[in-house]
Amino acid sequence: MAPVNIPQATAWAQKALEVAQKAEGESKVASEARLECQNVIAVVLFNLGMLNELNNEHGKAQSHYEHALEMSKAVGMNEGVMEAQEALKRLKSQPPRS
């Protein structure tokens, strides 16, 4: 398996978040497209948290996981809720790596 280029992956995830947030803002209220954008935003926030965690940026990871949890709850994405809760528990149970 090739090594992960965390900065590049983070840049792509940030761009995905920007695009999804823009599309969400342009979607009609309570439309199917808006809901799909919100699902994408929740997933991208979680992925950003994972990348932050891999890069030992626990504060940023926690923030992204918390936002992913909020968004997952808002859109009724149960798997996103469970994954974000597990990630937050994992962060709290381990000290930051050196």
Image (cartoon, helix red, strand yellow):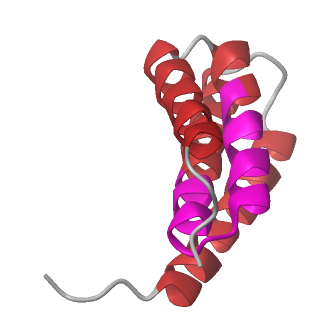
At 28% across and 88% down in the image, what residue appears?
A: 3
Query: 58 and 38: which one is in front?
Result: 58
Q: Which residues are magenta?
A: 47-69
- Position of the N terminus, as image quadrant, is bottom left
How many numbered marks are there? Answer: 0
Q: Is residue 12 above or below residue 34?
A: below
Q: Is residue 47 above or below residue 38?
A: below
- Position of the C terminus, as image quadrant, is bottom right
On the image, the x and y values in percent for residue 26 come to 83, 44
At 20% across and 88% down in the image, what residue appears?
A: 2
Q: Is residue 62 magenta?
A: yes
83 on left or right of 67: left
87 on left or right of 25: left
Query: 24 and 91: which one is in front?
Result: 91
On the image, the x and y values in percent for residue 54 come to 50, 69
3 on left or right of 77: left
Q: Is residue 54 above or below residue 42?
A: below
Looking at the image, which residue sits at the far left? Answer: 1
Could you say which quadrant of the image residue 92 lies in? top right
On the image, the x and y values in percent for residue 74 come to 73, 16
On the image, the x and y values in percent for residue 23 come to 74, 50
At 77% across and 41% down in the image, what residue appears?
A: 24
At 53% across and 55% down in the image, what residue appears?
A: 47
Our reading of the magenta stretch's main secondary structure is: helix
Q: Is residue 46 magenta?
A: no
